[in-house]
Amino acid sequence: MDPIYLDYNATTPVDSAVVDELLPFLTTHFGNPSSNHPYGKIGKDAVELARGRVAAALGCTPCEIIFTSGGTESDNQALIGTAFANRERGNHIITSSVEHPAVLKPLRWLEEQGFAVTYLPVDGFGCVDPDQVRQAITPQTILVSVMHANNEVGSIQPLAEISAITRERGVLLHTDAAQSVGKIPTLVDQLGVDLLTVAGHKLYAPKGVGALYIRQGVRVAPYLHGAGHEGGLRAGTENVPYMAALGKAMELAAQRIAAGEPGKVAVLRDRLHAKLQELAGGVFLNGPEKERLPNTLNVSFEGVVGADLLARLPEIAASTGSACHDGKGELSGVLKAMGLSRAQGFGAVRLSLGRLTSAEEVDHAAALIAAKVKEIRAS
């Protein structure tokens, strides 16, 4: 049998309805959207339908959405494009110490280009203090980038409070919402953000497609140069099948969130946590109890190394951190920033649930994990 999949924060399976949406554009409807004939018009219409669906899910207008190859490109476009387009206003950027490498690495590169970056600390739950954002802003600050929800522990950042500060000071706000879109409401006006990153494969669309919301009027320099696609911001012939897929996935996500899917997933997450505490004991929650993603459970097992535990559990597919950038012998940067000891940090396991997770899988996974934890402790 296949392992029980508890790694939805790493990637999700493609929803069957999403597959049905994209397949015709791999076969029958193969036209280039830039072509002025019926084949091209079908492709163009599909792209704009998808753009409208993404916009509707985020609560913005279609003209504020550009398609990308995924979360990493969206983050790079937002950070590098905004920095260079607004360089005459200043050269200072603020971010948090728990961002994904798709944010931290471009910012390190921007530092090499003469920009100054402030990396704000987080509290023991992985959250940024809005007052520290206020204190860090200078007359040279042009951009703040704080993720919506953390990929490892699920902490949800106080973006609305941060945006009130950035708006007051005339500073742009970007958020990497790769982990939150599709799991919790991500309406751009409620969050108060100027730029927002979407990653398709985190919300039941294929890998290799994403989107970037850019509030109308925000200046962003082009990242890829060419024939002027995506409003001149992202050149390259449109990936129609995957854009159609992302649009459908966003539409489904909005419907499922409205129907209460996050609450149902949270019930299963809490059931898993309770059973691990009951059966294994010595279980420590990493991250906040309430203000976190409904699907994310990051726990440390006393006296156990997380990587060792998962290596001995082929029946479980999970992660010790972000699957995108696991290092060897290094404590997770997120857990380190939160102030966890090395013992607790290396004992951490990230269990992330999803749309297809069942109560039976949760119960079976808890029993398997607890049995292996006891075995390791006894050895």
Image: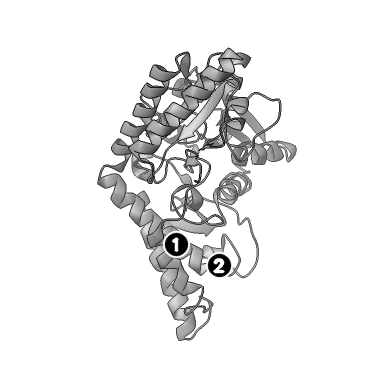
Q: What residue do we see at 61% from left, 57% from top?
A: 222
Q: Which of 188 and 237 is in front in this view?
A: 237
Q: Mark 1 points at which residue?
A: 245
Residue furthest bottom as drawn: 37
Q: Is residue 57 visible?
A: yes
Q: Which of 109 and 73 is in front in this view?
A: 73
**Badge 1, how many Cα within 10 Å: few under 14, some, many 20+?**
many
Indicate whether 235 appears above or below 92.
below
For marks 1 and 2 on the same chain, the one whose residue lies earlier in the sequence: 2
Where does label 2 land, which residue? Answer: 229
Where is residue 150? Give x, y as percent. Answer: 49, 33
Q: How crowded is mark 2: few (under 14 residues within 10 Å), some or many (20 or more)?
A: some
Helix, strand or loop at label 2? It is loop
Q: Is residue 332 visible?
A: no
Nearer to us in this view, 144 or 178: 178
Kind of element beneath mark 1: helix
Side of 15 relative to 312 (left or right): left
The CA span between labels 1 and 2 is 19 Å
Query: Which residue is located at x 47 percent, y 17 percent?
Result: 284
